[in-house]
Image (cartoon, rainbow, N blue to C red):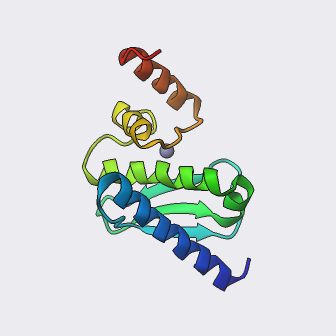
């Protein structure tokens, strides 16, 4: 992928992030989005921040996104936005936190495939009496 194509795609994803943030929380996405041009093997996307709050970013990989397709890419972006939203509110936002799982379910974002996250999901569902 050419540099200009990568930047165009990055801006498209950033705009999508804004649309999703407005749709679900009625706010703009205030972080940045970093799009890598190499494939990721072990994860689909990530949310990263620095404690001083200067760095707040969602990271994605362009080749990984192409491989996953638009539907999953959108879902992954929404998942990272849930991390961002809860983090920005000072709410526990780890993949295994109940608050995170509940918000993902509310907005229709996919959960982490991490087995601990899956276990936390099962526990959450038992607790709310839906399983
Ligand atoms: Zn996550």
Which quadrant of the structure image shows residue 130? top left
Where the N terminus falls, by quadrant? bottom right
Residue at 49% x, 20% y: name it: 122
Task: Give coordinates of residue 18: x percent, y percent.
Answer: 41, 66
Left or right: 86, with 13 as reference point: left
Left or right: 6, with 10 as reference point: right
Q: Judge by depth and name the residue closer to the eye, 52 or 63.
A: 63
Which quadrant of the structure image shows residue 50? bottom left
Q: Judge by depth and name the residue closer to the eye, 10 or 129.
A: 129
Answer above or below: position of 24 versus 97: below
Residue at 32% x, 47% y: name it: 86
Task: Give coordinates of residue 75: x percent, y percent.
Answer: 55, 50
Residue projecting furthest to the left: 89
Left or right: 10, with 55 as reference point: right
For the question of whether residue 39 can be seen, the reply is no
Task: Give coordinates of residue 28: x percent, y percent.
Answer: 33, 66
For the question of whether residue 26 can be seen, the reply is yes
Residue at 69% x, 58% y: name it: 64
Task: Give coordinates of residue 9: x percent, y percent.
Answer: 60, 74
Answer above or below: position of 7 versus 65: below
Left or right: 8, with 82 as reference point: right
Residue at 59% x, 79% y: name it: 8
Residue projecting furthest to the bottom: 4
Looking at the rendered structure, the number of numbered marks drawn on it comes to: 0
Q: Judge by depth and name the residue closer to the eye, 4 or 106.
A: 106
């Amino acid at each position: 992928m050419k540099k200009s194509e990568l930047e165009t795609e990055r801006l498209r994803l950033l705009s999508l992030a804004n649309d999703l943030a407005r749709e679900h929380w009625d706010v703009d996405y205030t972080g940045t989005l970093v799009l890598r041009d190499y494939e990721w093997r072990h994860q689909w996307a990530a949310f990263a921040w620095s404690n001083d709050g200067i760095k707040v970013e969602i990271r994605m990989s362009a080749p990984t996104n192409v491989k996953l397709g638009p539907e999953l890419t959108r879902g992954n972006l929404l998942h990272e936005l849930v991390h961002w939203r809860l983090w920005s509110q000072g709410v526990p936002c780890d993949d295994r936190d109940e608050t995170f799982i509940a918000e993902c379910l509310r907005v229709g974002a996919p959960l982490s495939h991490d087995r601990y996250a899956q276990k936390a999901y099962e526990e959450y569902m038992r607790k709310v009496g839906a399983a």
